[in-house]
Image: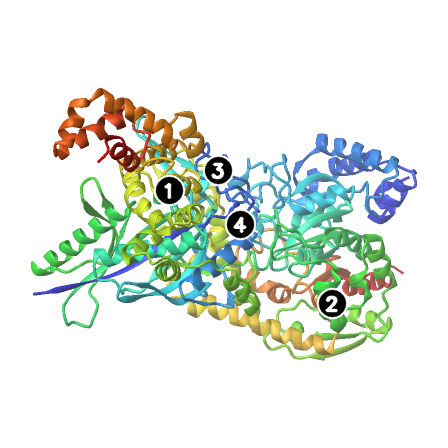
Amino acid sequence: MDLLTLSALELSAKIHAGETTVREALDAAYRAIELEEPRIHAFVSLCKEDAYAKAQAVQERLDAGEELSPLAGVPIAVKDNICTKGVRTTCGSRMLEGFVPTYNAHVVDLLESAGLVILGKTNMDEFAMGSTTETSALADTRNPVDPERVPGGSSGGSAAAVAAGEVRLALGSDTGGSIRQPSAFCGVTGLKPTYGSVSRYGLVAYASSLDQIGPIGKNAADCAALYAILRGKDQRDATSMPAYDAEQNAPYIAEHMNAVHCSKTPDEFVSAVKDYSLAGKKIGIPREFFGEGLQEDVAARVREAAAALESLGAQIEEFDLPVAKYAVPAYYIIACAEACSNLSRYDGIKYGYSSPDAEDLRSVYINSRSQGFGMEVKRRIMLGNFVLSSGYYDSYYKKALQVKRLVQDALTAAFERYDMVLGPVYPTTALRRGEGLSDPLKLYLGDIYTVMVNLAGLPALSLPCGADADGLPVGLQLIGKPFGEGELLGAGNKLQITINN
Amino acid sequence: MEYEIVIGLEVHTELATASKIFCGCTTKFGGEPNTHVCEVCSGMPGVLPVLNKQVVEFAIRTGLATNCSITRYNKFDRKNYFYPDLPKAYQISQLYLPICREGFVQISGKQVRIHEIHMEEDAGKLIHDPYDDVTLVDYNRCGVPLLEIVSEPDLCSAEEAIEYLEKLRAILQYTGVSDCKMQEGSFRADVNLSVRPVGQEELGTRTEMKNMNSFKAIARAIECESKRQIAVIEAGGRIIQETRRWDDNKGKSFAMRTKEDAHDYKYFPEPDLPPISISESDIDRVRAALPELPDAKKARYIKEYGLPEYDTEIITRSVELTRLFEEASARCSSPKDTANWIMTELLRLMSDAGVLPEDLAFDFASLGKVIALVSSGKINRGTGKKVFAKVFAENVDPESYIREHNLALVTDTAAIRAELEQVVAANEKSVAEYRGGKEQAFQYLIGQGMRALRGKAPANVVGELLHEIVGC
């Protein structure tokens, strides 16, 4: 039996049926990693010993008849900005190269209690700042489709690991497109959940008001199962929200939601996703999403995907979203402002990199930060400090918050008319290595289709919809209403079945 | 030229919550360094704050007790700066929408306006080790909830400033939001001070004075700084806007930093905490549970118990003294006696022992017991004072202490009479002298009688019985 061709749900089903074991699944994953890593470099740490111990424990729980989840026994990779107790969590930075958290992120606890087995930590752009994974100080991750291309970023390691078949599932984080864009570049499926639907406790913060953890997988159904495990209120994250708490969400559910979101267990959620029908659903396409700078065959594949959705019963309609052009600058102002504050704690005093050649407190701060952070991180810290400085706050940060509000209002208005909004994930397919680093501004502008979603706090799904002339994957983006993950995954699942047939 | 002093005060008070503002760690003072910490309050990567609701309730309570309006929709902001005692390199505070605004505190003759009250977290403590010449950090205090209470510049002397601070402290203690122990740093005040020629409307340039840890030090710092500023102006100089550090040992202040090198705190809204919505009914609930405040208590003591205003002024200054007064007077049913004992005996014992009201450690009912024992004639006043001193120092129970040490007065008249008859018999000479009209001789007999009774009979009873025995 070739375990590597199975989806995560299929693998877990086989483990549940006793046709294979958690250990065999883990063995297969580590074999694939051994094979692929020299070429891909998706991981920065593997935790074999711990993983085998956990696998054994999961097997025992399953053998004892304990009901864990539809993903029990499945090996999973975790982005290296999500804290894992006892396993170093580097954020792709020299600053945290030796940092071993004393606690688990909430999502890590959730994975463990659902019986998934974490086998390693994946590479990423330093502190999630970047869209190529090239800003990592630890590893040089390649795109499995073409190793001369970047995997995208910042969750490049997670997307590459899934694309290379090293794992079926991975956790990523998305602040401005960091799950969706690498998923598109590598040809896998990634979900950026509604802000607040997955706890951020233990996610090393980049831009707190925009960061979300989400699943990356082979297909929408696997992502649905993982998302259903991750979502929900966490007492340790004040911005997290209950997944299906009738009382809390009742008015909103009544107004906007279908039954998918309300299904309680991961099993129920997955079957609701699979039962989802596109018949009569309205999908809007912003005209601005097909403007200048968009690679032609990306536009073509996305339009073909729209046509496929239409053939599944959806109604497609174009609309104007003029606020789109302000989203990128607003995003970079807000993200950098929050980042400069979030990253201030790395001062070389308590943990992380501390400069060996410092003489006094001031030089501990200056040398540790100068030596510990890479260029892109420094650039964003400087930008953030600038836009928050007294005298500039009103003209930059405050204005950016106003744009954020306009984006939210425009999308809320769009969702009065549409069930989903469709567009590309990124203007191009995977960039060549080094191409993005030479022109940071151009790279920032590439985030045009993804950052709006974070500004508005909405869920969005990135899924493969064919390839360009070079055979590089093209990503389709479906944007949903708040807590509309079920609908996105349902639509994505139908589309994937159609495309695969 | 005559000058007037303009003072505004910023008070930081630590709240008496059981746990910290954004995590579950204890707020207990002391403890081995870095033992009251967790990932959250030590600012490890990836952690998030969760607001302790008790802090909001305490802030509302304080706002209502100082006549503030409560901001229905308020939120936290980040104040960014690097310092080793601040592990996140930002303090979660409130800048744009503080929880309480525009209140006042009444002191004699004027209302001192409160500009705002906001919630924030305390930082850790730096401890300099002079032997190894290193500075160590204790994060135990990180995340202890604070209220910052900012007054308008309505005060114009050290006396007024102290009166305001005492009143504010009493309010915070009455409402139970803080123990206000200055020696433990749970009540700290920074002084903003400027001077201007009398009649000038425009405010002078101000300085901010930090590091005073007693009311006396604050008063001294105000006196000293106002004199310094006037001297600078008189000499033709200009006041520089700066932060100064008070050195109480040297009795003078030193410039810390000027406006030019002041921090740019780069405040922005805290993204990890949702805004706080306070409803009318939340406010009503807190208002209904508000305890009697100093002014109301004072008025009631005067009206209900007929206490002199001076006494009520002293007693209501501290919530502990009012608790003592109320418990003790309930026990002995004599509010006036209780107030007298507090004003004389207790305050003397406290000042001799250097004990503050919040550190009183005896059972408050015991004072009432002592007073009742004296007024019922069980013990005399002198014994009462001695017993109360024991109560104060060792929290003894007055009744059992008296019993154990055999201090009760003899009330059996037959027994007293028998003792006195022996005294009379043994002092025939004095009896004769008294009968001959020598008053002093009778005093001598009383003295001898008291001595024979070892002081345990009421003096008036001894006198009456002696008269009977001697026969005139």
The image shows residue A243 at horizontal and vertical percentages of 73, 58
For disc 3, the marked residue is A353
* Left or right for B9, reference A27: left
Question: What's the residue type where badge 2 is placed?
Answer: Ala
Is any part of residue B60 visible from this angle?
A: yes
Tag 4 near tag 3, CB within 8 Å: no
Task: Determine the CA span between mark 4 and mark 3.
Answer: 27 Å
- Tell which subunit mark 3 falls on: A
- Disc 2, SS: helix
Q: Which mark is residue B22?
A: 4
Q: Which residue is mark 1?
A: B371
Answer with mark 1 or mark 4, whichever residue precedes in sequence.
4
Give the x, y percent position of residue A327: 57, 69
Could you tell me which secondary element the residue under label 1 belongs to? helix
Q: Position of residue B8 (x, y in %)?
A: 28, 60
Look at discs 1 and 3 and give the one toward the viewer.
Answer: 1
Disc number at residue A250? Answer: 2
Considering only vertical position in the picture, is A424 above or below B316?
below
